Amino acid sequence: MYSKIKGFSNSFGSLVIVFFIFLTLPFKGVAEDGYRLWLRYDRITDENKLNEYRKNIQTIHFPGDSPVLKAAREELTNGISGLLGVQVKFMDKLTGSGTLIVGTPKSSKVVASLKLNDKLKKLGREGYRIQNSLIKGKKCIVIAADTDVGILY
């Protein structure tokens, strides 16, 4: 009786090893490091949406130099270049329509001029607001928060 069980175990063990090898071969090199699980910046494939987004985000005005804002700026750069397939220029000044403005009332004079302080405080430390705005006659997208952490989120 023991020899039958032992023989079965050896056959079963060999089968498991072969099955494992078979399953792992086709997937070799496909593993991810986990980063892209949350933040996938694959280029937009819908050409109409891609052209619309490129039109609406031509430049970025993102003042501030805290470590948190630098991290947010880097993430935004990776995201936009990945999604739009282009490198968007960062500008020190509001240059025209199609500008993405990012900041807090403390880091950005443009954001401060929108007088969003009360609305941003209600969002809390980690909250943020995204809105379309007409600034000096130019259509812009604004990402504003009360704190640098809110901008990062």
Image (cartoon, rainbow, N blue to C red):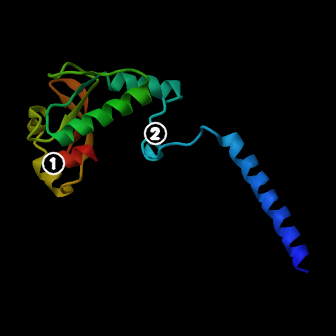
Q: Amino acid at mark 1?
A: Thr
Residue drawn at point x = 18 percent, y = 23 percent: 137
For residue 99, side relative to residue 110 (left or right)? right
Q: Position of residue 92 (x, y in %)?
A: 15, 22
How far, Cα to Cα, is label 1 from label 2? 25 Å
On the image, numbered disc 1 is attached to which residue? 147
Q: Kindly identify which numbered label has been placed on residue 21.
A: none
On the image, numbered disc 2 is attached to which residue? 40
Q: State whether residue 142 appears in this view.
A: no
Of the image marks 1 and 2, the number of the one nearer the N terminus: 2
Which image quadrant for residue 53? Answer: top left
Q: Amino acid at mark 2?
A: Arg
- Residue farthest to the bottom, as pictured: 1
Secondary structure of residue under mark 1 = loop
Q: How crowded is the residue under tag 1: few (<14 C-alpha within 10 Å), some, or many (20+)?
A: many
Q: Position of residue 151 (x, y in %)?
A: 23, 43
Of 30 and 86, which appears nearest the observer? 30
Residue drawn at point x = 11 percent, y = 52 percent: 118
Q: Which quarter of the rendering shows the N terminus?
A: bottom right
